[in-house]
Amino acid sequence: MKTFIRIVILGPLAIVIVALAVVNNQTVTLVLDPFNPAAPFFALTVPLYAVFFATLAIGVLIGGVGSWFGQGHVRRAARQSRREADRLKAEVERHRSDDRPDTLSIGGPNVA
């Protein structure tokens, strides 16, 4: 089932990506010097689809880092809960290993 869903989703996505790359294969000059565009310090000539895909990849990376930082409090709470659970498990095991009976018997009103 997973394979079928991957084929249904990734197949058309791959076709769109290849079509985008084929249609936008003209070269563009990427100038990274906003102060002197006539004689730039650094200019790079690349296909237009490479600019699209690089921008997309950088956006995904920035979004992933942002969500990772945004969910830091959730990871911190999970770590604290895990430590607390481990501490409580160790305490339960320590109490079970004592020479005490497993059950507590409470005497009724006629117990002397």
Image (cartoon, grey):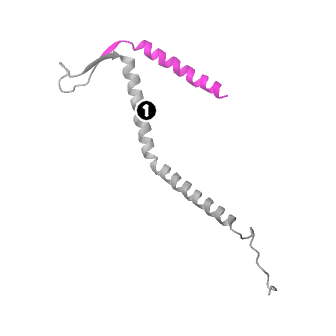
Q: In x, y percent, where is residue 25?
A: 39, 12
The reply, left or right, for residue 12 in relation to residue 27 is right
The quadrant of the rendering that contains the C terminus is bottom right
Camera-nearest residue between 44 and 22: 44
Q: Could you tell me which residue is drawn at 51 percent across and 56 percent down? A: 80
The reply, left or right, for residue 88 in relation to residue 23 is right
Residue interval drawn in magenta:
1-28
Q: Residue 100 sits in which quadrant?
A: bottom right
Q: Could you tell me which residue is drawn at 42 percent across and 28 percent down? A: 57
Q: In x, y percent, where is residue 39?
A: 18, 19
Q: In x, y percent, where is residue 74?
A: 49, 50
Q: Could you tell me which residue is drawn at 79 percent across and 85 percent down? A: 109
Could you tell me what secondary structure mostly forms the magenta stretch?
Answer: helix
Q: In x, y percent, where is residue 70?
A: 43, 46
Residue labelled with disc 1: 60
The quadrant of the rendering that contains the N terminus is top right
